[in-house]
Structures are given as structure tokens and as C-alpha cells.
Amino acid sequence: MGQYNKAVLTTVGEKLIARALAGEIKLNITKAKTSDFAYPDNADLKRLTDMQGVRQTVCDPETVVFNETIIQTRVLFSNEDIASTYYIHNIGLYAMDGTHEVLFSIVTAEMPDEMPQYNGVASTSYIYNIQNVVQDAPQLNITVNPSGTATIQDVLERVDAIGGNISETVIETLDTVEDKYPIPTAGESVKRFFGKVLTFMKNIRPLSGDKIIYVSANTGSDTDGDGTQSNKYATITKALSTIPENLNGFDCIIDIGIGVYDESVVISNFINGRVQLRLSGNITVNNFTIQNAYAVIRTIGQSFSLTCNWLFVTDSGNALSLIAVNWNITGYKEYLTRNTSIIIDNTSNLTASGIIALTGNTDVAVFAVNNSRAGLGTIRGTGFDTGFYSYRNGLITCTVNNLIATRLYGTDNGGIIVKSSGAVIGTLSTDVNLYVATTGSDTIGDGTSGNPFKTIQHAIDILPKDLGGYTGNIHIATGIYPEEVIISGFSTSGVIKLILSGDISTNTFTVLGSNIIITSSTSEIHAISTNSLLITDGANFHSWATIMWNIYYFRSTPAEGSFSMCVARGSTSYVSGQMTLSGNTGTGISILACSTAFFGTLHGTGLTYGVRLSNLSKFNCIVNNLRHY
């Protein structure tokens, strides 16, 4: 699940509450809507009367008085009518103001949920409980929608209210259900079954703090154990099953005792935190998978080994294995027609700092594919056909490589391998075109015009650093991109070209040691709005006349000082269009360390220094409307 900020009552919403408290109207929450528009951090949400980018609408959501100061609205959004994937950046509640429907409150996302395109088989739904803080909530005259499904809590509250007692009612017949849910046993009482449900609900509730679970293959029990240090589980899988999906910013630590665990370990779909496997001895498992989760494998000081048949990190998985953990990988997984010992796939990351010993495989040792990254410490093994194989913008780095293979390195389709000597293998073989839009996805997007990426940085990051004399074209649709754009370390034999089809905004913009061109897709003028612009480390920067810059803040660095725009360390900048500086009372433009900057038209007021030059740097401007320089 995503992470969302507290609800913000709009000015109109506050007025409606005041009228409801005065008895003039009934407060009627008529609709809940989602929006894929990312409002900037400085947006005045209270002044909104409607949301931009509305994607879904639910009528008559259930609204109740939650406590003395809070009213709560519960709403469910499903993807059954969703034709294209989007991110839920905002949830808005709407109410009637006389004959008009207005935005009552808005919830914005810190980390938005992704609403996927419906696949025609299984639907995806999100349930949100939106709480609005009001004074004298019990005194509000609220219109309540009586429809909805009763929860377990609703049932228990009703039983208590009528003085009933169903605790000894016996369950006689059973319905077939999935094993992952609590299952009643024929003949058991409702009291006992609801105890199972209560334990289940506690286990799926987001963490409220760091949690430690103990496992021992030798002394634990999955039947009678409870995961405490004195009563351990027997398997890692059982410990994982008791962890809630939403870690809520905390760590869940599984302390694993020495032993052989006859199980396949799958760490899957945990969000907003880390699952730590803490080895207290050498362990052996069948195989190891990390999928769409952040997993840390570590010890407490002493070095231990983890033995398995293969290691697989996939679907945006993030695996960090610290230096005291040594891997013995004794087999392989068949993947994309190759037998491979270590696989990193689908925008995933593996960092393994310890020693990795590979045996039992004669095909591929390490395979990084589909925008995935592997950073390895010391690796050894013999008899491989291919040692490292990087495919579809994969990246593999290795500190100490003792692999012996017929072909030590293999790259295809933009894959890159960084050898222990620091040399980079992998290059563009032709000009490429990637597409970015705020409606895209960095998870399921492929960078085509019909299935674009969501962020500019993701498009930049999947390009190999060696451009091979070719151009990486990144087509950017109009919109707000709340990210720090960094273009760094690309070979100067090629060019990164950003092509705008509309106005865009970013947090900051930095170019280091690369050749960059920024232009429009047509002859129309488009604007880039950003907090600051830094061009450094020998970069060559060209912004064509169809691009207008609005730099509305400043940045401070130890090397360059405070500035709105800085050209430094032997860099060259050509900004042919108009540039306007605001939100800064210090230095507007710094040109430092043998750098050169040319401008078309400059605007800006309130600056102490319009332009600051140092160390043989050069400045030229056709129309300079800055205060002075």
C-alpha cells in the first residue's frame, strides 16, 4: 500500500462543517474521487474547489462519526473499469453546497498506490478510511449511506449491543477457503474461531515498531511455537507468514538459528520497510527468492554461510547481503532458456558484499536483465560457459572476480558490466527513443510512446553510460515531475537529448560531464520550471531557443556556493531561450573554474549579484535584464 498525508479540509469544506454544526444543513458526502495529478509541495490545497486529473468516482461513500473530533469516510476503488494503469496521487471527498457539489477535503500521496489496468481475470481494489478532523463531531448532522458490507468488527459491535452471546455457537458445516486465511475446524466454537481471526488480523495489521521473530530448524515448532526466543518457529516460511504486508517504516527481523531448512524461502510483497534475516549460524535452504520487497541478510559480527541452489531477485526486489554473509550457491534456476546461479530481473537490485562461491552449474553464473543491478564483492567458480551476462539494460559490478568461464562477459541490448578494474562493458548500438509521461509507469512501462515511463530519471538511468557515438532521445510529456533530475557520466562521444512536448517542472536539474541537448518536439516554446540548475564536471549543455527556463529558488553546495544556476569545472552552457530567476536574493548565476556560459535573454530582480565569474570563466548575454553582474 502507498503512504498518504492527513486529509486537508478545503475552505469550502470548513464552511460546510460550520453550517452543519449550526443545524442549517445536513453534511452529505456525495462522492469520493481519485486523481493522478501530482500537486506541487507548495500548492494551497485549502483553496481548491475541484481536483485535476480525476480518474475514478465512487458515489455515496459511507461516512460516520468516528470519535469526538473525527468523522471517517470509508471508500473502495477497484480497477474493473480501468483501461490504463495510473497512480492514485490524490483522493478527494465531495459534498453538496446547496445545489452545487464541491471538494470537501483532499488527501495527497507521499507514495501513491498504483491502480493497474484490469487484466480481465482478477481485479485489484484499495480500501481507504479517510478521517477529517472537526470540532464537536457527534453534534454534526450527517447523511449516512446505509449500504455496505459488514466487517467482523461491525458484527461483534452488533452482538454486544443487543446483549447476545454467540461465543459457544458450534460451526457444523464448512465452506472451502484459501489456506492463507483463518479456517474453522468442524465442531469448534465461534469464540475459538474468532480468536483465530483476531490473531490473523493482528498479523496483517501494519507494524507499530521493529519486530523480532525467532526460528530454529532444530528446536522450533510451527504448530506450537509463537516466534518468541523461548518458543521458536521451525521454518523461515512460517515466520514470514506472520509478518504484515505493510511494515509501516519499521524493520521485521527474523533471527535464524544454525541448521538445514528444507524449504524454499520466498520474501515477497512487503512494503514500507525491511525484512531482515539475521543468521546466528550457518544455514542451508533449498533456494532463495526476493520479490517486490526489501530484504537484508546479515549476522551479528561473526561470519556465517548461507547455502542454496540458486538466488533470484525480481519484480523491483531489493536485496542487501552484508559482508559477513558468505553465499554457497550449489545449483541453478532455468531462466530465459539459460541455467543461471544468480538472477536479478525486472528493475531489481542485489548488493552482496561477502564471498560468493558457485558450484553445480556449467551455463551462466550471474544474469542481470530488464533494468536490474547487481553489485558483488568476491565471486568464484569454475566451468561456466558465461560468467557475467547483462541484458536489456542490466548492470553488473564486481570487486574481486575469480570466475573461470569460456566467455567471461556477455552483454546485449544495452546491458553493462563494470569489471573489477573499473572498465565498463556495454554500449548503444543505435539511436534510441524513450518516452516519459506522468501517466506512465516505471514498473510496467517499457519506454515506448504507448507505454511510457513515469519519471525522467528512470529513462536516464536505463541508458548505458557508453553512448557509442549515438543519441539517447528522451521524449517528455507535459506535467509535474517531482524528482531531482541528474544526468551524469555519459560518454562525450554521444548525446542525451531531452525533447519536450509541453511545459514541465522538476525539483532540481543537474548535468555532470555529459553532452546534453534540450529542445521542443515542435517549433512551439515550452517551459522548464525547477528550483536550480547545475552544469559541472566538463559538461556540454545546449538549451535551444524553444525552451524557456523558470528557476524559482536556489541551491547551495560546498564547491559552488549559493546560486540559481551554476556552470562550473570546465563546462560550457548555451541557453538560447529566455531564462527567469526568482526566489533568490544572493547570486543568480555562477560561472566558475574555466567555464563558459552564453545566454539569450536573462530576467531577474532582487539579486545581490546577477552573475559571478571566477578563474578565467566567460559570460555572454544578448539581452541581460538582471540587476547587475
Image (cartoon, helix red, strand yellow):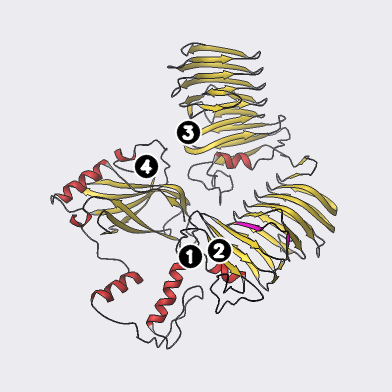
Percent coordinates x, y for residue 170 in the rendering: 37, 87
Q: Where is mark 2, residue-wise?
A: 212
Say what amino acid the circle numbered 4 marks.
Gln
Q: Which residue is mark 3?
A: 505
Instruction: Using the image as rendered, state which of residue 137 and residue 40 is in the foreground.
Output: 137
Cα separation between marks 2 and 3: 43 Å
Q: Which residue is mark 1?
A: 122
- Residue 343, horizontal then vertical, whole percent: 70, 57
Of the pair 140 and 462, the residue shown nearer to us: 140
Q: Are marks 1 and 4 in contact (CB under 8 Å)?
A: no
Residue, disc 4: 52
Is 455 drawn above or below residue 493 in the view shown?
A: below
Q: Amino acid at mark 3?
A: Ser
The quadrant in which residue 422 appears is top right
**Amino acid marked by disc 2:** Ile
Q: Which contiguous range is marked in magenta? A: 295-305
Looking at the image, which residue is at 48% across and 33% down? 504
Mark 1 vs mark 4, CA separation in Å = 29 Å
**Which comes before the other along the chain, label 1 or label 3?**
1
Labels 1 and 2 touching (C-beta < 8 A): no
Q: Earlier in the sequence, mark 3 or mark 4?
A: 4
